[in-house]
């Protein structure tokens, strides 16, 4: 099943976890610690009443986007911060969560492309949206791995409830380690 199909079937918890996982994997771009999103992950195991309060606290911990960042800025760190800023404050708003999860999915794929091909715009026969719908030929390695993680997380949440949530956190942590290694390698290469 494609990522688009899985997302269409996801409930509010699955959508929130999907968007949160995309942001989680991009934390190294923001210089945030691995535990920065832990309160939001924990709120997904409950009724979600604390989501808005936890979201406000998390946003306060994350570095702000540069004041001179233009709306079309494609700096990976700016794109990651925008994911955090766009998160809906009410976890019960399924339409808002669906839009946010979709935007986070595309942003995370785009960020992984930018990390795989620094300074090069997305090129290829298919858009990133097409990738989510199942057209996977010719993807760069980081984009392919990110797409696989996004799909795995939605599958885990659809079939395993809170046990799936724990597994989703582990899958996301693995992706965060990959991004951290890529950022570290790129930093050493430019230093």
Image (cartoon, rainbow, N blue to C red):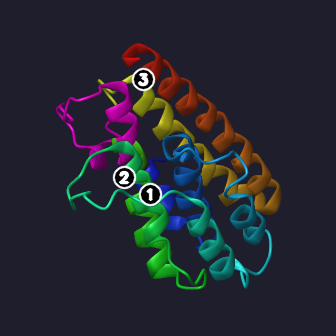
Please tell me whether mark 3 or mark 1 is closer to you in this view: 1
Give how far apart the Cα atoms at labels 3 and 1 are. 23 Å
Q: Secondary structure at mark 2?
A: helix
Residue topped by disc 1: 81
Please tell me whether mark 3 or mark 2 is closer to you in this view: 2
Q: Which span of residues is magenta-colored?
A: 111-135
Contact? badges 3 and 2 (CB < 8 Å): no
Residue at left 72%, top 62%? 41
Q: Earlier in the sequence, mark 3 or mark 1?
A: 1
Contact? badges 1 and 2 (CB < 8 Å): yes
Residue 190 to residue 69: above or below: above
Q: Secondary structure at mark 1?
A: helix
Instruction: Answer with left or right where residue 114 lies relative to residue 17.
Output: left
Residue topped by disc 2: 78
Instruction: Answer with left or right where residue 107 lies relative to residue 174.
Output: left
Disc 3 residue crowd, few under 14, some 14–19, many 20+, Cα 10 Å:
few
Contact? badges 3 and 1 (CB < 8 Å): no
Residue topped by disc 3: 141
Residue 142 lies in magenta, yes or no?
Answer: no
Front in this rendered view, residue 138 or 5: 138
Res 119 → quadrant: top left
Give how far apart the Cα atoms at labels 1 and 2 are. 5 Å
């Amino acid at each position: 099943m494609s990522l688009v199909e899985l997302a269409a079937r996801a409930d509010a918890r699955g959508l929130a976890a999907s968007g949160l996982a995309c942001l989680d994997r991009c934390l190294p771009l923001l210089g945030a610690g691995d535990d920065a999103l832990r309160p939001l992950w924990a709120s997904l195991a409950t009724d979600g009443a604390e989501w808005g309060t936890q979201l406000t606290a998390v946003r306060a911990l994350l570095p702000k986007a540069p004041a001179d960042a233009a709306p079309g800025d494609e700096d990976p760190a700016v794109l990651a911060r925008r994911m955090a800023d766009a998160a809906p404050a009410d976890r019960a708003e399924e339409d808002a969560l669906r839009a946010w999860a979709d935007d986070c999915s595309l942003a995370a794929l785009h960020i992984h492309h930018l990390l795989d091909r620094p300074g090069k715009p997305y090129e290829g026969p298919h858009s990133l949206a097409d990738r989510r719908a199942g057209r996977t030929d010719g993807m760069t390695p980081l984009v392919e791995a990110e797409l696989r993680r996004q799909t795995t997380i939605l599958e885990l949440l659809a079939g395993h409830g809170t046990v799936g949530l724990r597994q989703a956190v582990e899958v996301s942590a693995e992706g965060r380690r990959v991004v951290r290694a890529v950022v570290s390698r790129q930093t050493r290469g430019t230093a």
